[in-house]
Amino acid sequence: MCRFLWKDGLMADQGDRVLLHVWLPATRRSYDVWVPSDMSVHEAAVLTGSILAGREPGRYVDRGDVAFMDSGTGRLLNPAASVSSAGLVDGSQVMLV
């Protein structure tokens, strides 16, 4: 398991971010990724894809057309919703598809 932290001056407060447990089928690995709770699900997925492409060059190519899927239900998350309003909390398990 790998951990990544998206850093920005706006994330100084612990309450402003959520730790997602992200499964990436292309690598068959899971990653813990911090994302801002007020970021849209789409932006969080794109950011995560970019981070993981840098971490796994040759195994995962970021094409920018990614989405988060709820690992428990298999449903795509609403890309327009914020991370927090989509119900994502610390430890939520999502798949990057």
Image: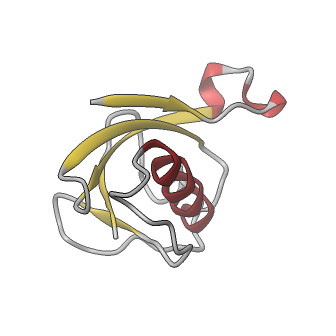
- In the rendered image, the residue lying farthest to the front is 58
* Residue 16 placement, left or right of 75: right
Q: Quadrant of the N terminus?
A: top left
Q: Looking at this view, is 55 or 88 the one in front?
A: 55
Q: Looking at this view, is 68 or 30 the one in front?
A: 30
Q: Quadrant of residue 20?
A: top left
Name the residue located 51 percent from the left edge and 78 percent from the top edge: 65
What percent of the width, then of the height, locates residue 29?
22, 45
Name the residue located 19 percent from the left edge and 71 percent from the top edge: 74
What percent of the width, then of the height, locates residue 25?
22, 61
The vertical placement of 15 against 30, above or below, is above
* Residue 35 placement, left or right of 38: left
What percent of the width, then of the height, locates residue 49?
49, 58
Q: Looking at this view, is 61 or 6 the one in front?
A: 61
The vertical placement of 35 against 64, above or below, is above
Name the residue located 33 percent from the left edge and 57 percent from the top edge: 59
